[in-house]
């Protein structure tokens, strides 16, 4: 004869974890998708800005170790120029992203607002 197996009741800890994965986690109110996108752009621009800074340092290293080699000096100058232009573009894009994020949150534009939001001042 075949018997039936009954599952045990869900324990409180397991039930809490299942509830959290099913959307019951207390993550706060939903976030505006525009702000999520702005945060992703900020992180990406920060990483790109770091790469540009490293390229500037690399170009300076090439120049300092050139030892009179004109080809290496030219390469160093090109690297520094391109990295500086890239850094200016990234910083401009970063400031535009901050301004758009502030407008999306309903804050007025201005330097005092930037410092209040970014640095908690």
Image (tube, rainbow, N blue to C red):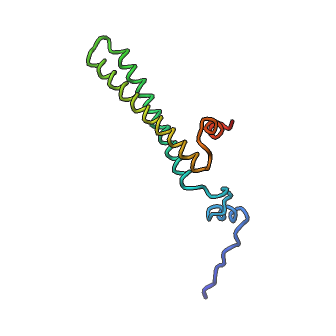
Please, which residue is most extreme toward the bottom here? 1
| Residue 10 locus on image (x, y percent) | 69, 69
Judge whether 98 appears above or below 82 on screen.
below
**Residue 6 percent location from the top left of the image:** 66, 78
Could you tell whether 29 is left or right of 95 in the image?
right
- What is the quadrant of the C terminus in the image? top right
Residue shown at the point (68%, 38%) measured from the top left? 120
Residue at 53%, 46% (x, y): give it. 100
* Outermost residue toward the right in this view: 12
Residue at point 31% right, 17% down? Answer: 73
Pick the front one: 105 or 29? 105
State whether residue 6 is above or below residue 58. below
12 vs 40, left or right, is right
Image quarter of the N terminus = bottom right
Task: Pinpoint residue 57: horizontal percent, then vertical percent.
Answer: 43, 23
Residue sitting at x 64%, y 36%:
112
């Amino acid at each position: 004869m075949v018997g039936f197996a009954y599952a045990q009741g869900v324990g409180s800890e397991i039930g809490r974890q299942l509830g959290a994965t099913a959307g019951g986690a207390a993550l706060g109110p939903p976030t505006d998708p525009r702000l999520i996108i702005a945060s992703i752009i900020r992180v990406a621009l920060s990483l790109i800005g770091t790469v540009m800074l490293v390229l500037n340092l690399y170009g300076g290293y090439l120049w300092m170790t050139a030892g009179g080699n004109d080809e290496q000096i030219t390469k160093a100058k090109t690297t520094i120029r391109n990295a500086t232009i890239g850094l200016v573009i990234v910083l401009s894009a970063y400031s535009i992203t901050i301004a758009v994020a502030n407008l999306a949150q309903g804050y007025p534009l201005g330097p005092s607002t930037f410092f209040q939001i970014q640095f908690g001042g």
